[in-house]
Amino acid sequence: MKHVLAIDQGTTGTTTILFGADGTIVRKAYREFTQHYPQPGWVEHDPMEIWKTVVDTVTELVSGGSEEIVGIGITNQRETTVVWDVETGEPIYPAIVWQCRRTAPLCEDLQPHAAAITEKTGLPLDAYFSGTKVTWILDHVQPSNLDRLRFGTIDTWLIWKLTGGKTHATDFTNASRTLLYNINDHAWDPELCEWIGVPESLLPEVKPSLADYGRATTIPAIEALPILGVAGDQQAALFGQACFSPGQCKNTYGTGCFMMMHTGAQRIASSEGLLTTLAVNGDGSVCYALEGSVFIAGAAIQWLRDELQVIQHADDTDAMARQLDDNGGVYLVPAFTGLGAPYWDMDARGTLVGLTRGTNRNHIVRAALESMAYQTADVLRTMEKELGSQIDQLAVDGGAVANNFLMQFQADILDKTILRPHLTESTSAGAAMIAGLHAGVWSDSSELAAMKTIEAEFTPAMTHDTREAHLAGWARAVRQTRCV
């Protein structure tokens, strides 16, 4: 049996998975890495530490195995920005993470160009995206050797490291998240680069997601294996969920929450706070998608564990939430780094509202879980309004979907059926599928779609009045958050 290696470089850790030709997971390895918060609203990663997690997970996964591996697929946290010196091989500054809000003032300065930027990129002018992060790094480091510098999102950084500096490239899904790439012309846009202040010499080559990105030369365990597929994490998850046709939709519950709908060859310009972005068709070609981005979802559970220390393990949250009959009027709006879709409020900060003397840690845990469902409801209702039609079912994936309390509450608050597949590692699966198509492991998208099976369906069981009361409480909490 032929196998494909997927490197899934996420916001809080790196997962490397070996997939068989039947679409099942053979083995996987995982490493967390350090989150750095140098100032309120700032988030950084060490690119060299990220690279080490890739080396360690790949080596652990492959060493000692005898499987035939025919290619590598890469998927990554999008928008996170690295600038490095090609001669030293070292980043000139830590990676600025997609969640980081430090470039909000730069975005304010660019407001005269906001409408044109959105028309060219499909994105709102926001600190979320990569372009202003590059400018901030250059402005604060003030390097004298611009000709030696390269910019990349995490996929580009890993490709460069894996190939020993031979390939400086990205794919169109990641390029479309930079504020520098014109999704109408499918090319870097000189005008955008000039407005934002990014020299074109720093930019990587843009390739299709299904393409040859060179061979790995720097990790002995995968020496000479070709890199054959690359996609940003949410586009990879859309592909991994077999959403190959216009109208098909998925929601990923990871560090953030990301709902994405395939819209085919048609670019839908959102007027309701959604993103228009590029995604991957079943044959590997480019298509358009609508996306709603929620910045903090599973990261709120990590916050409960690491900062507040009210839980020891994320798995504890299901049982803790079930100890309560209801939320007790407690709502958490986890706007730790602002609010994403549909609000796009860079200045909002997290709030915990409805506290009484009877509030305990179970209420806070439950509020954190429910916040994922409420934010998803905000995005889905916006998407339905944009499309003028209803979405009947929602396919889900990501680590948090293992939480049955959350999935049932999501079905209740949406009044829609939630479909959880057997394989919830859709992001990694998508990267493997893209690379495997190029390697000939699978012949076409129909073969990939046939491998998807549903493990559980969650159907709504909440009354209309209860649902509306919950949503009204959430809306009040969001209004309070935006007034801070």
Image (cartoon, helix red, strand yellow):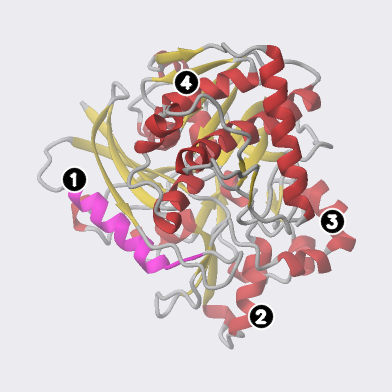
Task: Residue 328 in the image: state x and y as whole percent.
Answer: 59, 33
Q: Which residues are magenta?
A: 44-60
Q: Secondary structure at mark 3?
A: helix
* Residue at horizontal 39 percent and vertical 28 percent from the top: 402
Q: Amino acid at mark 1?
A: Val
Q: Nearer the viewer, mark 1 or mark 2?
A: 2
The residue under label 1 is 62
Q: Distance of mark 3 from mark 2, alpha carbons?
A: 21 Å
Label 4: which residue? 445
Residue visible at 73% across and 71% down? Answer: 197
The image position of residue 321, as x and y in percent, is 45, 31
Which residue lies under the disc numbered 3? 114
Looking at the image, is mark 2 or mark 4 earlier in the sequence?
Answer: 2
Mark 4, Cα crowd under 10 Å, few <14 / some 14-19 / many 20+, is: some
Which is the main secondary structure of the residues drawn in magenta?
Answer: helix
Residue 257: % across, % down = 56, 39
